[in-house]
Image (cartoon, rainbow, N blue to C red):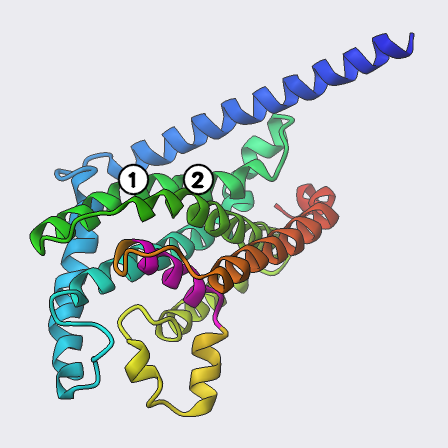
Amino acid sequence: MADTLTTLKATHAKSDFQKDVFILKQLVGRDFKRKYRRSVLGVVWSVLNPLLMMVVMAIVFSTIFAQGRNGSVSPELYPLYLIVGNVTFSVMSDSTSQALMSIIDNASLLKKVKVHRFVFPVQKVLFSLVNFGFSLIAVAIVMLWFRIVPTWHLIWLPVGLLFLMLFCMGIGLLLSSLTVFFRDIMHLWSVVITAWTYFTPIFWTDDFIKLMHPVLQFFMYGNPMYNYVNFMRQIFLWQTNPEPVTVIICAGWALVAFAAGYTVFHKLEHKFILYI
C-alpha cells in the first residue's frame, strides 16, 4: 500500500513537472512570435541592436576616456568590453522588467487553468536567455572584426549563465509577486534599472572607477551585476578562468536572490487571485 502511494505521488509530481515544462515552452514560443511579428528584420534585430549600441557607446565613451583614463582596456578591446557588458546587463534588465508584470498579464490564464504560478516570471527569464543567445552572434562578429580568437575559457559560459539566470529568477519572482499588490513597482523599477545601468561598469573601466568618490566606488564594486559582467569579460575579453572570488560572489548573489524571491513569492501567491 505504501509503495503504491509513493508511486502515485511520483507519477503526479512527474506529470506536474511535464506540464510546467510544456507551458514554459509554449509561453517562450508565444513571446518569441510576439516580439518579432511584423518585424522586417526579425531576429536579426537581436544581433543589430547590441552592435549599434556598441558603436554609439564606443564613439561617446572612447572620447571621454581619451585623456589616458582608459589604460586598463586598450582601444582595440574597448568595443568588445562594451558589448559584453551591455548584453550581460540586458539579460537582467529585460528579464526582470518583463517578469514584474508576468502574473498580472496572465491573470485570465491563471483564473482558468491550474498551473504553478512561478512558471510565468521564470518564463520571462528563459526568454531573455534566448535573446542572449542571439546577442552572442553580435559578440562573435566583434571578436571576428578585431581578430580576437575565442579560447577554451568559454566553457565557463554555462556556469556564468546559470548563476545569472538564478539571480534574475529570484529578482523576477520577488518583483512579480509584489507588483500584484503594489502596482507602483512597475514605474519605480524603470528608475531603478536606469540608476543600476550607471552603477554597473558597462562603459566605465576600472581605471576610471578608481578616480571616483569612495562612496561611488562602494556602489560600483558592491553592485551584484559588477560581478556577473566581470565574469563574462574574464572569459570573453581577458580569456582567462574567472577569478575564484568572482565565481563565489556570483554564486552567492544567485542563491540569495533566488531564495529571497522564491520565499516571498511562495508566501504571497495564494492571494494573487484576489488582486489580479
Q: Earlier in the sequence, mark 1 or mark 2?
A: 1
Secondary structure, magenta segment, majority class: helix
Residue type, numbered disc 2: Leu
CA gap between label 1 and label 2 equals 14 Å
Give the crowd class for mark 2: few <14, some 14-19, many >=20 residues within 10 Å: many
Q: Which mark is residue 191?
A: none
Residue 72, image quadrant: bottom left
Residue 118 coordinates in the image, percent (x, y):
60, 40
In this rendering, the answer to whether 215 lies above or below 165 is below
- Judging from the image, what secondary structure is the residue with disc 2 in? helix
Q: Which mark is residue 35?
A: 1
User: Is residue 232 shown in magenta?
Assistant: yes
Residue 138 coordinates in the image, percent (x, y):
18, 48
Residue 6 coordinates in the image, percent (x, y):
82, 15
Q: Residue at x 47, y 62 (%)?
A: 246
In this rendering, the answer to whether 113 lies above or below 143 is above
In magenta, the rendered stretch is 223-235
Q: Residue at x 30, y 44 (%)?
A: 152
Q: Residue at x 16, y 49 (%)?
A: 149
Residue 155, image quadrant: top left
Give the crowd class for mark 1: few <14, some 14-19, many >=20 residues within 10 Å: few
Q: Which mark is residue 126?
A: 2
Describe residue 115's horizontal placement relative to residue 152 as left or right.
Answer: right
- Judging from the image, what secondary structure is the residue with disc 1 in? helix
Residue 76 coordinates in the image, percent (x, y):
11, 66
* Foreground of the two, 141 or 87: 141
Q: Residue at x 44, y 27 (%)?
A: 25
Q: Closer to us: mark 1 or mark 2?
A: 2
Describe residue 146's horizontal placement relative to residue 133 as left or right.
Answer: left
